[in-house]
Image: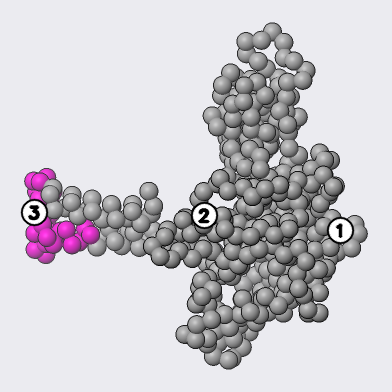
């Protein structure tokens, strides 16, 4: 049940209790000197007082969440980027777009690299969860030693899903069907309750994984090769100097390469992201004259890094804000966006008054043309939570404008570019290093998943 529904139910219950309670309440009320002296003994008056008290408590709870609790905006696949018209629901509009949209000549759909499975705090000690990554079902569990492990979800015995009903036993995951136990370190089966001997070949695939920067990530390579680079550790997060302040999650119906390519598409920033965040995310209205008085200005530069970090690229962003044509220096923010492989980006923020922090921008393919994109923010512990929450909310608004483009566009393998678009081709050449001859390609359009 949503918080709004809970609040409504609470108010109804408070009112109902006050209006229909019997003599015990009346006797307490009339027996109290305060109630007697003030004359507040009538049921309607008591109802008003209690409803006001209930509203006040709800308001204080809302204020507490606003000021102190992490911001979490988790969008459903059909929530953003689709236009529902002619009485259709958003889900119907999303499915129609997916069916009729031209796909284009796509690159391989699963690049080699590290990908986020979930945030670390979402997996408690001894907990098991089922997840989807790169078209595969995996079981993610945290052993009694505190380490997180990722293995193929399906038991090789009779195919039960280890992530649905499985349980942790030490450093192993136990199948819910027959109790077979698989070791998280290597996936080997170490116990079959009713068998005298465990076959040597009994095992599940273990995915190379790491648990750092507040996230659990897995390594994918189409040829099964071991990791060729590591995701850098953000020391401020490890030390606790920067703390978790929230996350957003979106599902995007596009090829994975479309998303990081935006970093090199400098021209789109001036057109798509200049209108103020107050003008919203629906591209039909973002250029409304009503909100013309507030504008974002961007100066951007994108470059790939050299060896030994050729798998990384860097985008430098300088943001400024003008209101009624006047520059507001307080809103000047410098951002360094460092991409590590195809699926992880560190958005490092620095402001002279509001401190420092990072947004972990992660793209994980769930299916060939369905990406889960998360933004998880960590910020200086001594900065009021309202500051990073505002930054994350503003980032979310700007990002959802891109989502509306991605969800409806076609991938163009040979785009018509002008000289000023040269960074786009440069980015495509850089990104191509994450494909191998054996990288999986989309053989046909998959239309069976409905939102």
Left-right relation of 301 to 385 = right
Q: Nearer the viewer, mark 1 or mark 2?
A: 2
Q: Magenta segment, which residues?
A: 22-51
Figure quadrant of residue 335: bottom right
Pointer 3 or 2: first along the chain: 3
Vertical side of 215 occupied by 269: above or below: below
Q: In the image shown, does 395 or 51 lie closer to the viewer? A: 395
Q: Nearer the viewer, mark 3 or mark 2?
A: 2
The residue positioned farthest toward the top in the image shown:
196
Q: Residues within 10 Å of mark 1 (few under 14, many from 20)?
A: few
Pointer 1 or 2: first along the chain: 2
Compute the Cα span from label 3 to label 1.
Answer: 78 Å
Left-right relation of 406 to 31 = right
Residue plotted at (64% across, 53% down): 369
- Give residue 283's position: percent from left, percent from top: 54, 73
Residue plotted at (57% across, 66% down): 404
Residue 176 included in the magenta stretch of the image: no
Compute the Cα span from label 3 to label 2.
Answer: 62 Å
Prevailing secondary structure class for the magenta stretch in the rendered image = helix
- Give residue 446's position: percent from left, percent from top: 62, 47
State the mark number for residue 309. Answer: 1
Residue plotted at (53% across, 81% down): 287
Residue 41 included in the magenta stretch of the image: yes
Pointer 3 or 1: first along the chain: 3
Vertical side of 144 occupied by 268: above or below: below
Residue ID for mark 2: 95
- Give residue 373's position: percent from left, percent from top: 62, 56
Residue ID for mark 3: 30
Figure quadrant of residue 362: bottom right
Asked which secondary structure carries label 1, the reply is loop
Compute the Cα span from label 1 to label 2.
Answer: 40 Å
């Amino acid at each position: 049940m949503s918080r709004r529904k809970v609040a409504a139910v609470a108010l109804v219950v408070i009112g109902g209790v006050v209006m229909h309670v019997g003599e015990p309440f009346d006797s307490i009320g009339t027996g109290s000197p305060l109630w007697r002296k003030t004359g507040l003994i009538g049921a309607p008056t008591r109802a008003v007082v209690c409803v006001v008290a209930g509203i006040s408590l709800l308001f204080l709870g809302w204020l507490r969440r606003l000021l102190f609790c992490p911001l979490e905006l988790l969008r459903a696949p059909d929530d953003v980027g689709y236009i529902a018209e002619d009485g259709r629901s958003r889900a119907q509009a999303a499915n129609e777009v997916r069916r009729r949209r031209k796909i284009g000549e796509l690159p391989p759909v699963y690049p080699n690299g590290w990908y986020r499975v979930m945030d670390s705090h979402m997996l408690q000690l001894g907990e098991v969860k089922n997840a989807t990554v790169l078209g595969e079902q995996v079981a993610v569990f945290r052993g009694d030693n505190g380490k997180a492990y990722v293995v193929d979800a399906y038991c090789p015995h009779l195919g039960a899903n280890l992530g649905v009903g499985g349980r942790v036993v030490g450093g192993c995951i136990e199948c819910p069907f027959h109790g077979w136990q698989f070791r998280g370190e290597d996936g080997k089966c170490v116990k079959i309750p009713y068998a005298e001997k465990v076959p040597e070949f009994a095992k599940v695939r273990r995915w190379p994984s790491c648990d750092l920067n507040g996230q659990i990530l897995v390594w994918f390579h189409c040829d099964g090769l071991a990791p060729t680079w590591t995701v850098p550790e953000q020391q401020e997060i490890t030390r606790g100097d920067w703390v978790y302040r929230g996350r957003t999650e979106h599902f995007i119906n596009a090829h994975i390469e479309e998303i990081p390519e935006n970093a090199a598409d400098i021209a789109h920033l001036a057109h798509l992201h200049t209108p103020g965040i107050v003008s919203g995310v629906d591209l039909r209205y973002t250029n409304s004259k009503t909100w013309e008085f507030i504008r974002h200005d961007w100066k951007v530069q994108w470059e790939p890094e050299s060896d030994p970090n050729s798998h990384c690229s860097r985008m430098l962003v300088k943001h400024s804000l003008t209101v009624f044509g006047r520059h507001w220096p307080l809103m000047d923010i410098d951002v360094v966006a460092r991409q590590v492989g195809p699926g992880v980006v560190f958005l490092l923020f620095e402001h002279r008054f509001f401190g420092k922090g990072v947004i972990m921008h992660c793209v994980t393919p769930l299916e060939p043309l369905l990406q889960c994109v998360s933004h998880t923010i960590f910020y200086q512990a001594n900065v009021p939570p309202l500051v990073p929450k505002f930054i994350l909310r503003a980032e979310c608004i700007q990002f959802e404008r891109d989502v509306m483009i991605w969800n409806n566009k076609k991938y163009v393998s040979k785009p018509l570019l002008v000289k000023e678009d040269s960074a786009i081709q440069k980015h495509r050449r850089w990104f191509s290093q994450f494909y191998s001859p054996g990288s999986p390609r989309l053989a046909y359009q998959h239309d069976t998943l409905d939102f």
